[in-house]
Structures are given as structure tokens and as C-alpha cells.
Amino acid sequence: MATTYHQIYIQTVFPVKFRKALIQPEWKSELQGVLGNLINEKGCKTIIVNGTEDHMHCLFGLHPTVSVSDLMKSAKSKSSKWLNETGYLDHRFEWQPGFGCFSYSRSHLQKVYGYIEKQEEKHRKISFKQEYMHMLRKYDPNPNKRYEFEDLI
């Protein structure tokens, strides 16, 4: 597909299972690097990966031969496996099933990059659930309840 022009920019958002605050500052950047590398290994181009203790945002250029679902399935499962093998946690780590997926034009990348870059600052004021519901409502004023992530048990 050397002659295929593409410009597909995607942001995915996904929480830790039950939105538990498990991602620690000591190894968060390592996890972000792992997620970015896993995205790149599929032929996509990672722009930024960032998040907080209970969720991650990934902004990347999607290769036209790759489905977002397959990419996220691979990145989430392999990053969970990596984290479980590091010994950073004394219990099993899992991402919540599913993810939010939002598309952007090239002209919006700088703004989205800045938004993702400032996750720690943003979440001093609002929760992940508030942020995510705001994102959903931006695209659909009445989002279906099935798109919400599970609460803590």
C-alpha cells in the first residue's frame, strides 16, 4: 500500500479495571513507553501516551491496514502482560474491557496533544468519569449507558 495516502488521527481512552488507581508515578512513564511501542509495532505512529493513576490516553496516526479494535486489543493485553511480569504490583493488573475512540483532523492535533499532556493537572479538578462523559457528550449529546466504564466494586 505504498501509494495509499492516509491521514487518520485517533485518540483512545481506557481505564484500569473498575477504574482503580493502580498506575504509580514511579513506573507510569515506562508503561506509557510500552504502550507507545506496541502501537508503533503495528505500523501506526504514536504521537503521545499519557494518563493518570486510573486511565490512559493514546493519540496516534492509524495505519489504514490496521483496525483500531485489533490495535487496542493487542496494546492493552500486551501492556497488561508486561506490567504483570514486572513485579511492580503485588496483584494482577487488568485494563477495563473496551475503550473510547475519537478521531481528529491534523489541524486539531496540537490541541489534543496539549490536552493529553496535561492529564495530571486536569484530574486535580475532575474525575476520569467526568472527563470521559464530557468527551462522549461532545460527540453525542445523549450517549448510550453501555459506553460508560464499570465503577469500583
Image: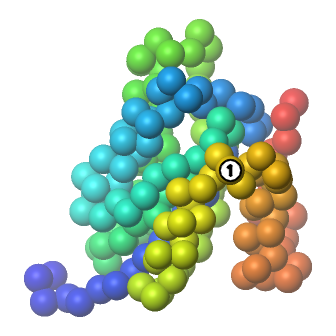
Residue drawn 77% across the image and 46% down it: 124
Q: How many marks?
A: 1
Q: Quadrant of residue 12?
A: bottom right
Side of 89 where 109 appears, left or right = left
Colour option used: rainbow
Residue 110 on image: x %, y %: 47, 75
Residue 102 on image: x %, y %: 58, 73
> Would you say residue 72 is visible in this rendering?
no
Q: Which residue is mark 1?
A: 121
Residue drawn 51% across the image and 83% down it: 108
Q: Secondary structure at mark 1?
A: helix
Location of the C terminus by quadrant is top right
Residue sitting nearer the eye, 123 or 149: 123
- State whether residue 91 is above or below residue 109: above
- State whether residue 60 is above or below residue 40: below
- State whether residue 151 is above or below residue 143: above
Residue drawn 84% across the image and 58% down it: 130
> Would you say residue 151 is visible in this rendering?
yes
